[in-house]
Image (spheres, rainbow, N blue to C red):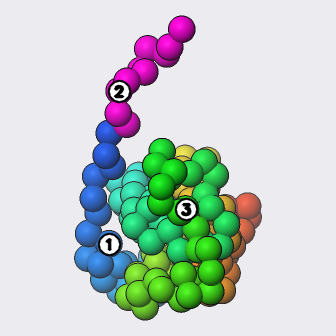
């Protein structure tokens, strides 16, 4: 017996303008707001960041030294992680820069946020702990750590 969705292709995720998103978020290097952020009010930007992280890991599988769990696509023909040092160094610097901007913003937002239970990018951040770039892995860890502490007082 097959499932009710057998034969149905998973819808292709909506493409995100990662460069535009990173450019916008780069303006907010530090938390400039006087109050704590309620993540319920940040759902649309968080969904865009989540989609951007997924898109980058899908388009540049060599960002990761260990493949994501579960794999980002059903295609087994394309590797889901770097297979060699040259693979790991093949990620364009602009992609790494955009990814770092997204992660810095997430860490800053999460350090100053309430209602962290609605955050839905934990698996993407966990996958990025295996990033081939040490700074990306460190920023992913900082964002995950920010989830586990109470928001900063203002």
Q: Which of 110 and 112 is in front in this view?
A: 110
Q: Does the magenta stretch include residue 2?
A: yes
The x, y position of residue 4, in whole percent, is 43, 14
Labels 1 and 2: the sequence-earlier one: 2
Residue beneath the point at 64% across and 52% down: 69
Secondary structure beneath label 3: loop
- Single out the mark in the foreground, 1 or 3: 3
Q: Circle 3 sits on which residue?
A: 80
Binning the other alpha carbons within 10 Å of mark 1 as few (below 14), some (14 to 19) or many (20 upward) gives many
> Which disc number belongs to residue 8?
2
The residue positioned 27% from the left and 59% from the top of the image is 15
User: How far apart are the two marked residues, 2 and 3, measured between alpha carbons?
Assistant: 23 Å
Q: Locate the N terminus by quadrant.
A: top right
Q: Can residue 138 be seen in this view?
A: yes
**Can the viewer see residue 49?**
no
Mark 1 or mark 2, which is nearer to you? 2
Specify the quadrant of the image occupied by residue 133: bottom right
Residue 62 sits inside the magenta stretch? no
The location of residue 148, given as percent across then percent down, is 73, 61
- Which residue was labeled with disc 1? 18
Q: What stretch is highlighted in magenta?
A: 1-10
Q: Find the residue positioned furthest to the front.
A: 77
């Amino acid at each position: 017996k097959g499932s009710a969705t057998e034969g149905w292709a998973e819808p292709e995720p909506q493409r995100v303008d990662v460069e535009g998103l990173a450019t916008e978020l780069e303006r907010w290097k530090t938390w400039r707001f006087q109050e704590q952020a309620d993540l319920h009010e940040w759902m649309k930007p968080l969904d865009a960041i989540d989609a951007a992280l997924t898109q980058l890991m899908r388009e540049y599988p060599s960002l990761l030294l260990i493949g994501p769990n579960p794999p980002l696509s059903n295609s087994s023909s394309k590797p889901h992680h770097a297979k060699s040092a040259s693979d790991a160094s093949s990620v364009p610097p602009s992609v790494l820069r955009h990814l770092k901007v997204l992660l810095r913003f997430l860490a800053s937002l999460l350090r100053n946020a309430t209602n962290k239970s609605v955050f839905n990018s934990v698996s993407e951040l966990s996958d990025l702990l295996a990033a081939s770039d040490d700074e990306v892995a460190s920023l992913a860890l900082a964002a995950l750590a920010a989830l586990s502490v109470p928001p900063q007082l203002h």
